Image (tube, helix red, strand yellow):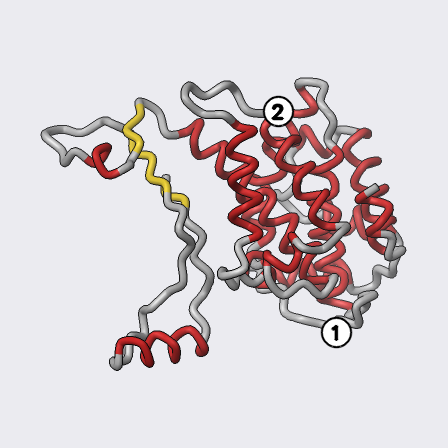
């Protein structure tokens, strides 16, 4: 597992790099200072001493991947959908938004409660580091970039921890909010109706045509919108589809977003 935020290269970045190096580099990318490598220590022969340069060599990488997917990537998706439709071009902008930032911090806490203890890892400290990384003013990570491929990302980032939260009797509000935020993002992208004046935009999702067809005759009604997108084939897991609590929470969050009541969610 590799963890390092790397925004898509922009023409401005490439121009800056060319100016600094006095040579054209079409593969230049922007990165943050933080980096983490987690590698399963299962090799058929000798290996380099990667741990001497900071890599974690572990017996099972899966728990670390769950931590990253649920805390970092899950929060990133929440930021992407809420931020984009509310005029926050970059993650750093969303983290400076008075109503979005508290929702992100709440998501960290919701996600970490679904994780099994991991030796040597303090989930609360990891959440603090994530907030600092997201707030980095020098990283231009676009919310619209992160928002792409939602139907492929939500199952691992949001649905999986939501299922575990339900089984553990934990609150599911933040996972329901992230799902509702994706639905609102899709609705605005198809219909071009946003409080920030945002017009229609490409969803950049492999199931974009299906989403558009599902929303073709759906107005700004939370229940209708929820049913239309939950009706996508092989999308919503059975555990969530059969949960009344889940449907109610998603509908509640979606209704607030459709009404432009982002401040109510933060409160």
Tell me the residue at 56%/63% (across/down): 142
On the picture, is 62 further left or further right than 183?
left
Q: Is residue 182 above or below residue 213?
A: above
Residue 120, quarter of the rendered image: top left
On the picture, is 254 further left or further right than 155?
right
User: Which residue, given by chain and number where applicable, does mark 2 sit on?
Assistant: 113
Residue 123 pos. (x, y %): 53, 28
Residue 68 pos. (x, y %): 48, 37
On the picture, is 246 further left or further right than 84?
right
Tell me the residue at 87%/52% (across/down): 261
Tell me the residue at 83%/65% (across/down): 195
Give the CA distance from mark 2 to mark 1: 37 Å
Residue 258 pos. (x, y %): 85, 55
Disc 2, SS: loop
Label 2 with label 1: CB-CB less than 8 Å: no
On the picture, is 152 further left or further right than 230?
left
Disc 1, SS: loop
Mark found first going from the N terminus, 2 or 1: 2
User: Which residue, given by chain and number where applicable, does mark 1 sit on?
Assistant: 199
């Amino acid at each position: 597992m590799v963890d390092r935020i790397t925004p898509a290269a922009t023409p401005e970045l490439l121009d800056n790099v060319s100016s600094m190096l006095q040579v054209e580099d079409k593969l230049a990318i922007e990165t943050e200072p933080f980096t983490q490598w987690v590698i399963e220590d299962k090799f058929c022969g000798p290996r380099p001493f990667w741990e001497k340069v900071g890599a974690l060599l572990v017996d099972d990488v899966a728990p670390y991947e769950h931590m990253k997917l649920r805390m970092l990537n899950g929060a990133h998706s929440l930021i992407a959908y809420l931020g984009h439709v509310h005029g926050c071009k970059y993650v750093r902008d969303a983290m400076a938004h008075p109503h979005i930032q508290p929702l992100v911090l709440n998501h960290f806490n919701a996600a970490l409660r679904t994780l099994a203890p991991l030796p040597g890892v303090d989930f609360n400290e990891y959440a603090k580091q994530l907030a600092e990384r997201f707030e980095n003013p020098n990283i231009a990570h676009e919310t619209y970039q992160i928002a792409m491929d939602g139907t492929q990302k939500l199952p691992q980032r949001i649905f999986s921890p939501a299922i575990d939260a339900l089984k553990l009797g934990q609150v599911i509000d933040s996972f329901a909010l992230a799902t509702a935020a994706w639905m609102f993002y899709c609705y605005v992208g198809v219909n071009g109706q946003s409080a920030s004046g945002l017009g229609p935009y490409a969803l950049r999702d492999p199931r974009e045509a299906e989403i558009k067809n599902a929303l073709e005759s759906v107005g700004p009604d939370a229940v209708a919108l929820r049913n239309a997108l939950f009706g996508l084939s092989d999308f919503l897991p059975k555990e969530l589809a059969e949960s009344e609590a889940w449907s109610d929470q998603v509908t509640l969050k979606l209704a607030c977003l459709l009404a432009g009541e982002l401040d109510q969610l933060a409160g």
